[in-house]
Image (spheres, rainbow, N blue to C red):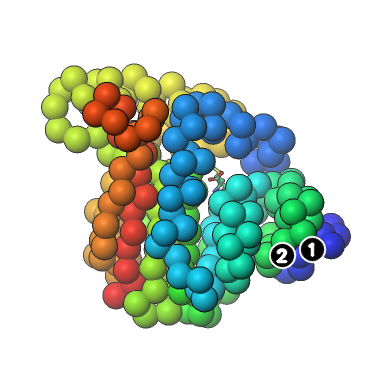
Amino acid sequence: MLIASSEVAHRHGRAYQYDHVAWCYETIARLGSFGAIPRLKAVQLEWISADARVLYVGAGSGEDVVRAAARGLDVTALDRSPRMLRRLGARLERAELRARLVEDDLLVFPPKGSYDVVVANFFLNVFEPATVEAMLARCRQHLADGGRLLIGDFRPPGPGLWRRLGYNLYYAPLNLGAWLLGLCAIHPIYDYATWFETASFEVVERRAVGLWGNGALSPACYETIIARAI
Ligand SMILES: C[S@@+](CC[C@H](N)C(=O)[O-])C[C@H]1O[C@@H](n2cnc3c(N)ncnc32)[C@H](O)[C@@H]1O
């Protein structure tokens, strides 16, 4: 694969489970989240300083990667899906931006502890709990001490029967649909912070994102967790 604006390192060239949805994944995510996912990704840049070295894991076709590259950040995007990365490369090329693209499994790509920020947007929710733990440990190994992990994902529902019920009526069909497409495991909404002590992270902040804006009537179904590597 030749991507003029970007170098592609560590290429395996095998098809991967997300290849068949690469062409429509972001559109479905945008529609299914009522626009909350792109809003979440736009706000995330607040926590990334201008001189940071940033690794996007499970980057997909990378609307967030393009935003970060447009800000002039030093960006690496890692994903196992060749088609996702091809779309991302084409996007970068159209916008005349650069990022380092790595086609690899996060559990295989060798960590050097050299990134200031690792971003895992809608990536960890693909896996069974044991794999989430392994992925978080790997994210930690890619970070320098004091580096930051940003996780954009579904927000665990707060207390209250009605809130939980309403939320699960929204989440369960999405999880089932993605599972039927072979994209993820079936599981409840994870609270990644419960794995942080084992993975050597601590929570700095959790920023909720509402389904339709951040007003009182907008259920806060998504969030970015900002964590520090300890
Ligand atoms: C749900 S998509 C999220 C994509 C993107 N971060 C976003 O927010 O649109 C998950 C991505 O993780 C990638 N992926 C899954 N397992 C992976 C692994 N072990 N190593 C690297 N990437 C992986 C998939 O190819 C897919 O592009």
Tell me which residue sits at (24%, 21%) in the image.
165
Tell me which residue sits at (34%, 77%) in the image.
146
- Which quadrant, please, contains the C terminus? bottom left
Q: Earlier in the sequence, mark 2 or mark 1?
A: 1
**Going by the picture, which residue comes out furthest to the left?**
160
Q: In which quarter of the image is residue 97?
A: bottom right
Which of these two is toward me, 98 or 78? 98
Q: What residue type is labelled 1?
A: Ser
Do tag 2 and tag 1 residues touch (Cβ < 8 Å)? yes
Left or right: 143 with respect to 110?
left
Q: Position of residue 14 (x, y in %)?
A: 75, 52
Q: Is residue 145 above or below residue 74?
A: below
Q: Where is residue 13 in the image (x, y as percent from the top left)?
A: 78, 56
Q: Which amino acid does label 2 sit on?
A: Arg
Tell me which residue sits at (40%, 62%) in the image.
47
Q: Position of residue 205 (x, y in %)?
A: 27, 57
User: Considering the numbered disc 2 on the image, is that residue within a helix, a strand or a loop?
Assistant: loop
Visible residue check, residue 41: yes
Q: In this view, does 155 lie above or below 212?
A: below
User: Considering the numbered disc 1 on the image, is that residue within a helix, a strand or a loop?
Assistant: loop
Tag 2: Cα neighbours inside 10 Å, few (<14), some, or many (≥20)? Answer: many
Q: Position of residue 204 (x, y in %)?
A: 26, 62
Q: Is residue 17 above or below residue 67?
A: above
Which residue is labeled 2 in the image? 98
Numbered tag placed on residue 5 in the rendering: 1
Which of these two is toward me, 198 or 100? 100
